[in-house]
Amino acid sequence: MVSPLLHRTPPPPTSSLLFRHRRTRVSCSSSAHVSFIKNVAVTEPPLHLQHLLNVLQTRGETVISPGAKQGLIPLAIPLSQNLSGSVTALLRWPTAPPGMDMPVVEVWRNGVWLLARNVDEYIHRILVEEDAKDGSKLYHAAAEAGETLYRKGDFSESRLENLDSYVLKKVGMFPDVLERKVSRHFEEGDHVSAMVTGEFYTKNALFPGFGRPFVYYANILLRLIDLQGRPELRGKRRC
């Protein structure tokens, strides 16, 4: 579940991003991250970065120094670390398209998984998922950002069939949600919809710079070929 393209992407011009530091805890204040993004990554910090850090810390992750990059790809700007050891980070593309926000990613030693295309979409999704479980702790942690991005109760009032449908319609596009949508189509035996959704997943405007959608779509096509050749397996195997 990683992007194969990221490991072949050259580092940004500034060599400061390649510095390695021992991973240390920091306070929930975003000042260190804001300074790093402005002065080292040389780009504009996300408006609701502080609120995202609050949310991450509230749900049990440890906020870490933006310079704690040892073992991570040089393009990642660390935000927090969870108990499994993976790091939530921002991704600083060296040649990002004009107007493109920094994506939120989860980073392991061996790869990267796209969590959200920007900070606001990530916060918004977290709040919707919490509301679907009748929680409010993270909503309060998001403070004014939460009030701006999501109105509590909107998911239940929407009467959409499931949480994933709400997220895609009201929040934004997310790789794991689209992949679950494909899997459901296969489970229902709707192979045409599975293929169409997979092709939609590969559109460059959705997740520019990430290779995962193309790998996933290739696997969809291989599965469809397999199903055509082995009718007894149709509707019985997960993607």
Image (cartoon, rainbow, N blue to C red):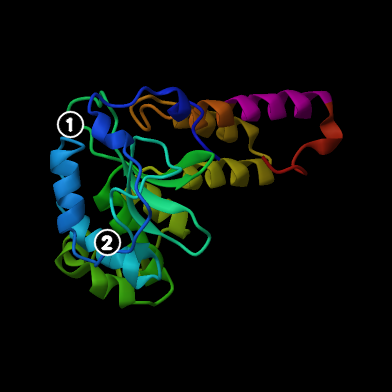
What is the distance, in whole Å, between disc 2 and disc 1 at their CAs? 23 Å
Q: Are marks 2 and 1 in contact (CB under 8 Å)?
A: no
The part of the image, by quadrant, that contains residue 208 is top left
**How dense is the environment of label 2, judged by Cα within 10 Å: few (below 14), some, or many (20 and up)?**
many
Nearer the observer: mark 2 or 1; the answer is: 2
Asked if residue 181 lies in the magenta stretch, the reply is: no
Give above or below for 86 relative to 196: below
- Residue 44 makes an appearance in the image: no
Q: Which residues are magenta?
A: 218-229
Amino acid under disc 1: Gly
Give the percent coordinates (x, y) of residue 64: 32, 58
The picture places residue 58, in percent across and down from the top left corner, at 33, 72
Per the image, label 2 sits on a secondary structure element best described as helix
Q: Name the residue: 16% across, 36% down.
A: 43
Task: Look at 18% across and 59% down and name the residue there.
Answer: 30
Residue at the image point whose x is 63% and y is 30% from the top: 220
Q: Quadrant of the C terminus?
A: top right
Apparent side of residue 235 relative to residue 129 in the rendered image (left or right) = right
Q: Which residue is mark 1?
A: 99
Q: How many marks?
A: 2
Instruction: Based on the picture, tell me whether residue 226 belongs to the magenta stretch.
Output: yes
Q: In the image, 41: left or right of 73?
A: left
Q: Which residue is mark 2?
A: 53
Q: Which residue is pictured at 38% across the width and 27% down the height?
A: 209
Q: Is residue 170 above or below residue 42?
A: below
Task: Say what amino acid the circle numbered 2 marks.
Answer: Leu
Q: Nearer the viewer, residue 43 or 69?
A: 69
